[in-house]
Amino acid sequence: MNLFQRDAPAIAAVASSERVSTQEDDSEVRLIVLDFGATHFPFLEGQSVGVVPPGTRDDGRPRAMRLYSVASARDGEWPGTNTVALFVRRVAFSGAGGTPAGGQTSNWLCDRRPGDRIEVLGPFGDTFLLPDDPATEILMIGTGTGRAPFRGFAQRRLRTAPHGPGNLHIFFGARTPQVFPAIEQLIADPALLPSREVAYSQAQATAKEHVQDRMRRRATELEVVLRHKRLHVYVCGSLGLESTVDATLDEIARARGVDWPALRQQLLDSGRYHAETY
Ligand code: FAD
């Protein structure tokens, strides 16, 4: 951790930057792959990297660092390459007089093109990590760019233990179906991913749903997952998600004779409950 800091950052080049949300979707999300070249930048799935755009703020002070979760496996976006993938959502808001403005770092990152150089800090984070044991059962619940670590976890499992015995289960909330293909395409094998539930809160063709609605629909399978002896639970996404997930798991578990608060505490105590919201 913290191998590269502001006074000596790693320099990476943008290898690719692909918009994964459609043009019609008002929220732009890009999958950006960075290439570290000859620099050794070790990282693990679930960690984050720091980015500081060049220049200074209007008041002359240095710009703040922003964190972006790793979205690829530790051996690179393409196996054996010195690369890391990030999902970056362009943060937009109105500036003075209603002119379009936006988040400093996310806009700067989304505007980078292949070949551009970026200073990268980190890696950061030692709690939101995937266990090496392929027999662990992984329950992932997320929204928005919370998909990033889950993509990294899936890539890692696909490359190291594609036939289990542990399974991956993902419950994901997105605004529209367009924002999810990047992870859908990656995890095409239903054997690896028995529960793959995506709720769309702004879908037009299908009923509007939230991630907790999908969890309730899969309550019977979730009970089996919750009773798994080697379960790890990961919650990643927008602020407020954790309390929603907690209440939903409590509701599902209680109806099936499982004491979720006690199980959650047990998972926390043994480092098997992981939450990251921002
Ligand atoms: P900033 O310039 O910092 O602005 C941030 C917010 O301030 C805006 O959203 C807006 O609400 C408000 N704001 C600022 N100025 C104005 C203004 N003039 N008018 C109105 N509102 C204003 N993000 C991702 O996209 N992908 C990830 O994988 C990811 N992983 C993360 C992991 C962790 C552990 C954490 C803590 C955060 C993560 N984030 C991720 C969020 C990311 O770090 C940044 O916070 C985000 O990109 C916004 O940074 P920014 O510099 O673009 O916005």
Image: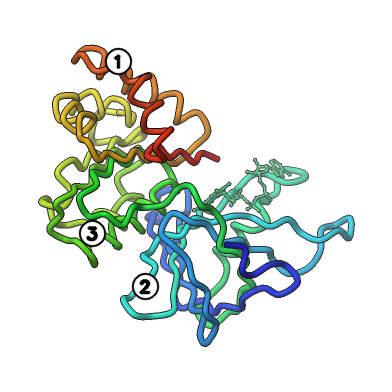
Q: Is residue 39 above or below residue 149?
A: below
Q: At 36% from the left edge and 65% from the top edge, which residue is drawn? A: 73
Q: At 21% from the left edge and 43% from the top edge, which residue is drawn? A: 196
Q: Which residue is mark 3?
A: 185
Secondary element under disc 1, as helix, strand or loop, is: helix
Q: Gap in Å between the C-alphas at discs 1 and 2? A: 39 Å
Q: How is the image coloured?
A: rainbow
Residue 89 percent across, percent down from the top left: 51, 53
Secondary element under disc 3, as helix, strand or loop, is: loop
Q: At 67% from the left edge and 73% from the top edge, which residue is drawn? A: 9
Q: Earlier in the sequence, mark 3 or mark 1?
A: 3
Q: Earlier in the sequence, mark 3 or mark 2?
A: 2
**Three-letter amino acid code of the residue under disc 1:** Glu
Q: At 41% from the left edge and 59% from the top edge, which residue is drawn? A: 45
Q: Is residue 27 above or below residue 215?
A: below
Q: Say left or right for 173 vs 189.
A: right
Residue 217 percent across, percent down from the top left: 19, 25
Residue 61 percent across, percent down from the top left: 86, 58
Q: Which residue is mark 2?
A: 75
| Between marks 3 and 1 in the image, the one whose residue lies nearer the viewer | 1
**Three-letter amino acid code of the residue under disc 3:** Gln
Task: Please give the label number shown on residue 251.
Answer: 1
